[in-house]
Image (tube, helix red, strand yellow):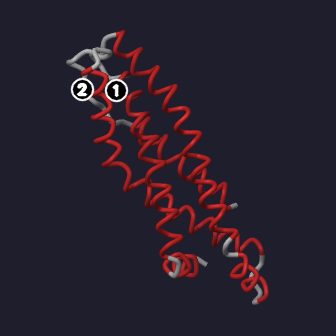
Amino acid sequence: MFALALRSVLLRPGRLLATLLSAFLGAAVVMTFNSLHDTARAPGVDHVSAETLTTAASVVGGYGTLLVFFAVASTLTMNVRQRADEIALLRHTGAIPAQIKRMIVGESVMVALAGSVLAVGPAMLGGHALLDVFKDGGQVAGGVDHVFGPIALMSGVAVTLLASAGAAF
C-alpha cells in the first residue's frame, strides 16, 4: 500500500505541490511564532521581554495555528475529493475501505512531514527576523538572542501532521 501511495503522489505533481506548499507555509508560520516561546524561556531573558514575547507568540501564534490548521485541512480535503474516481476504481478492484484510508492518510502524512522538515530553516530565519523587529521597536531588550527549540519544532510538526491526517481520514 505504501508503494501505491508513493506512486499516486508522484503522478499528481500539481496536487502534490499544492499540498506540500500548504504544509510548508503552515509549518513555517507556526514554528516562527512558537520560537518566541522558546526565546522567552531562555536563560537570561528579562521579565518584560519574556512577557512581550510570550504574549505575541500566544496571541498571533494561536490565531496563526488555527488558520494553518484549516488551510492544510481544506487543501487536503479538496485533493481527496478530486480523487473520487480513483477511489471508486480502487473499490471496484477489490480494495477495502481501510486500505484506501491507509493509502490516503499515508500520502498526506508523507507530504506533511516533508513540508514540516523543509519549513525548519525558513522558520528559524523568520523567528530571528521577528525578534529583531521586537528589538528595533524597543519591546524586547537588545541582548536577547533568538532560540529555536522544542516548542517551535514540535508545535509546527504536530499541527501540520494532525491537520493532514485528520483531513485525509
Position of 52 with respect to 157 (left or right) is left
Position of 131 with respect to 10 (left or right) is left
Number of residues whose C-alpha sits closer than 10 Å to that of mark 2, classed few (under 14), some (14–19) or many (20 or more): some
- Label 2 secondary element: loop
Q: Amino acid at mark 1?
A: Thr
Q: Amino acid at mark 2?
A: Asp
- Residue 47 image position (x, y, % from top left): 36, 9
Q: Residue at the spot x=77%, y=73% of the render?
A: 97
**What numbered label is drawn on residue 39?**
1
Quadrant (top left, top right, bottom left, bottom right) of the N terminus: bottom right
Q: Residue at the spot x=52%, y=62% of the render?
A: 19
- Residue 54 image position (x, y, % from top left): 44, 21
Q: Residue at the spot x=56%, y=79% of the render?
A: 8
Q: Quadrant of residue 153?
A: top left
Q: Which residue, given by chain and number where applicable, does mark 2 sit on?
A: 145
Q: CA distance from mark 1 to mark 2?
A: 7 Å
Q: Quick one: 127 or 166, which is closer to the camera?
A: 127
Position of 93 with respect to 162 (left or right) is right
- Residue 18 image position (x, y, % from top left): 50, 64
Position of 135 with respect to 98 (left or right) is left
- Label 1 secondary element: helix
Q: Quick one: 137 or 13, which is closer to the camera?
A: 137
Up-down: is 41 above or below 165? Answer: above
Asked if the residue under mark 2 is in contact with the one under mark 1, i.e. CB atoms within 8 Å, the reply is yes
Up-down: is 41 above or below 99? Answer: above
